[in-house]
Image (spheres, grey):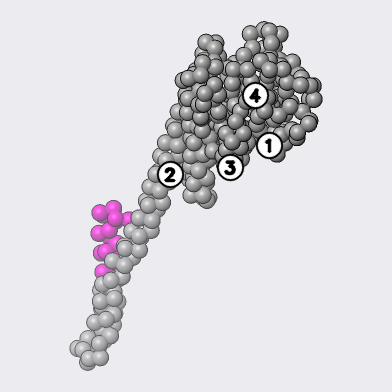
Amino acid sequence: MRYRLDTAGLAAVPENAPHVPGEKTLWLLGAPADRPAKGGAPDPAVETGIPETLLQRALENPYPRFESHEGLDMLCVRVADGPVAAEDSGSVLHIFLMEDDLVLFCGDEAYRATLETRLCRQADAPAESFGRILARLFEQILDGDRAALERQEERIMQLEREIIVERQRGDYVRRIIMLRRRLMHLSRYYTQLIETMEYLLLNENKLLDTRAAKLLKIEKSRASRLLASVSAQTEYVTQIREAYQSQVDISLNKTMKVFTVLTAIFLPLSLIAGWYGMNFNMPEYQSPWGYPLVIAVSVLTVGLCVFLFRKNKWF
């Protein structure tokens, strides 16, 4: 789909209409395989002067990056399917910015339709420019992320209440690991957006007007605040993990303490049993008070051990 940019804003261009050189045009295209065939609609690589080798190399590399060429800025960003989307989900967006053309490749048809609605059909008419369209693009990418991060923070606080306050039983290790992986993914996601906007703001080819640069700085600051929020949540989850590990260690220590006390109590009895288990004819065997005396000594030993342990608050 093509849109013509003029003083009235963005206007859709018929698919088979010829491209007018020098006319400011926004190209919103799908996957590389969807490029027009010869004899059909105009091919952006031909009409805009993007070198074919550069276009193919750029579209085959899905990793986020920024490249500046003579009269051309190339961006590749990974965008999430929704606010704070899950790991490995989302679309890859390739952007080619030139003086008279802005070309966007997006293989995700649903997200491409969203872009068309947000960037083209709702464009602010009179003072539109490619730089401001890019600023609106990053605004759309970050839309709703603040509220989503706040909801995620509430879930982390609920996890903390379950572990520390309510002390419920559950698979907390798995939940903490999943949270940390999600936060690491978000950290990489916002970092690549910030780096892309920083490189774009260098404006080496003078393709951004002053107003567009200001809008991009606003969106970069917004992404930086979101990244700071993710970093704070990562630290929060780390503290929860340490608190949970401390509780597990305390519980294990209590269990070991009980076994130690029981062992200490019955150790004298084991000594008495071993002593009288020897195959010798001891004098106590001939005494009628021998057996009751051994029982009394055993009970007294256990009682004394219990008394000493309770006095010293060992259990």
- Amino acid type shown at disc 4: Thr
Q: Which label is found at residue 31?
A: 1
Decide: few, some or many residues near mark 2? Use Cα within 10 Å; few <14, some 14-19, many ≥20.
some
Q: Helix or strand or loop: what does disc 3 sit on?
A: loop
- Which one is nearer the viewer's eye here, 283 or 140? 140
Disc 3 or 1, which lies upstream in sequence?
A: 1
Give the position of the C terminus as an image quadrant.
bottom left
**Is the residue 82 above or below the residue 131 in the image?**
below
Q: Residue at x 48, y 19 (%)?
A: 204
Quarter where residue 6 is shown: top right
Disc 1 or 4, which lies upstream in sequence?
A: 1
Q: Which label is found at residue 48?
A: 4
Mark 2 vs mark 3: in front: 3
Residue identified by numbered label 2: 241
Mark 3 vs mark 4: in front: 4
Decide: few, some or many residues near mark 1? Use Cα within 10 Å; few <14, some 14-19, many ≥20.
some
Q: Residue at x 48, y 31 (%)?
A: 191
**Is the residue 81 above or below the residue 281 in the image?**
above
Q: Helix or strand or loop: what does disc 1 sit on?
A: loop
